[in-house]
């Protein structure tokens, strides 16, 4: 199986890299990003740091799909919590994703609907998701499945966090997952998104501080889940 791992930040990929024992066979640089290709017999892992935000994520995903015939794309990283039932280090495996800042409500469409697209939310691949969660047990954190929303905004506001939770029934917010999902959807490539919570998206009034303090811990939790998946390849 050929699997791509996309992380927005180097801190997130560093945590995943610790587990990749396959030999590095190729590196490829395009549009300021480097794609690392690791191979071990039938299995291959391609890793890349996309940079932050939906455009960076989309550029990277399309280049990845154009240059490596991957069977699946997995986005791994950190997110803000939108749920009162989830806390720091808990992991959300996305069932589906919505671009929460896509707004054509002026035309009577729901917030998040992409113009002229045949779906509202981009559904993650259910068989990838079951490989990710089957047999998985984290020592101190929950792993839950649910919707993730993405936008070009770091959410550090209690009202906005509550709004996103109520409007989209989303468990977590971040800045890339739905863009990666969108690109995979139009290319018909299965994808999954694994995000661990680094902050409460402002529900505790401290998302940016919490993010800086806890991003390594959260990146490590998300990577633990990704490693469980990679070991099962
Ligand atoms: N990534 C991690 N925390 C986030 C937040 N609060 N908003 C957007 N992206 C995030």
Image (tube, rainbow, N blue to C red):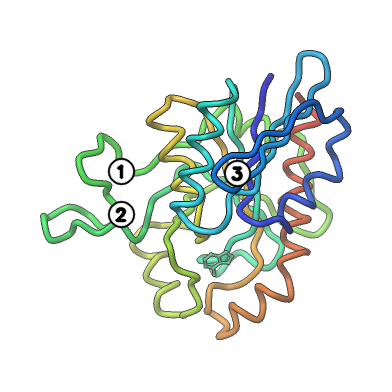
- Camera-side residue: 190 or 131? 190
Q: In terms of sequence position, does the residue under pointer 1 or pointer 3 come before the other? A: 3
Label 1 vs label 3: CA separation? Answer: 20 Å
Q: Residue at x 49, y 58 (%)?
A: 53
Q: Quarter-wise, where is residue 116 in the image?
A: top left
Does 26 sit above or below residue 6?
above
Q: Is residue 95 left or right of residue 138?
A: left
Mark identifier at residue 74: none
Q: Is residue 122 left or right of residue 84?
A: left
Residue 88: image location, x then y, percent? 69, 67
Q: Is residue 35 left or right of residue 123?
A: right
Does label 1 point to a residue whose CB lies under 8 Å from ligand 1? Answer: no
Q: Which residue is the site of mark 2?
A: 112
Q: Quarter-wise, where is residue 123 in the image?
A: top left
Q: Which residue is the site of mark 3?
A: 75
Q: Secondary structure at mark 1?
A: loop
- Camera-side residue: 75 or 136? 75
Q: Quarter-wise, where is residue 136 in the image?
A: top right
Q: Residue at x 65, y 73 (%)?
A: 211
Q: In terms of sequence position, does the residue under pointer 1 or pointer 2 come before the other? A: 2
Q: Are marks 1 and 2 in contact (CB under 8 Å)?
A: yes
Does 175 sit above or below residue 25?
below
For the C terminus, the image quarter is top right
Q: Secondary structure at mark 3?
A: strand
Label 3 vs label 2: CA separation? Answer: 20 Å
């Amino acid at each position: 199986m050929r699997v791509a791992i996309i992380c927005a930040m180097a801190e997130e990929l560093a945590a995943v890299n610790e587990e990749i024992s396959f030999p590095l066979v190729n590196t490829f640089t395009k549009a300021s990003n480097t794609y690392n290709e690791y191979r071990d017999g039938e299995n291959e892992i391609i890793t890349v740091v996309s940079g932050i935000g939906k455009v960076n994520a989309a550029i990277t995903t399309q280049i990845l799909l154009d240059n490596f015939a991957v069977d699946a794309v997995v986005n791994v990283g950190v997110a803000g919590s939108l749920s009162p039932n989830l806390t720091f280090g808990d992991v959300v495996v996305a069932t589906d994703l919505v671009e929460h800042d896509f707004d054509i409500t002026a035309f009577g469409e729901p917030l998040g609907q992409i113009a002229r697209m045949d779906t509202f939310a981009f559904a993650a691949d259910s068989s990838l998701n079951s490989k990710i969660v089957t047999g998985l047990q984290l020592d101190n954190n929950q792993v839950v499945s649910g919707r993730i929303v993405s936008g070009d905004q770091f959410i550090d506001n209690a009202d906005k966090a509550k709004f996103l939770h109520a409007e989209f029934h989303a468990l977590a917010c971040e800045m890339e997952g739905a863009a990666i999902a969108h690109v995979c959807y139009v290319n018909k490539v299965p994808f999954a998104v694994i995000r661990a919570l680094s902050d409460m998206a402002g529900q505790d009034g401290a998302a940016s501080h919490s993010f800086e303090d806890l991003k390594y811990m959260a990146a490590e939790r998300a990577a633990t889940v990704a490693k469980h998946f990679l070991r099962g390849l």
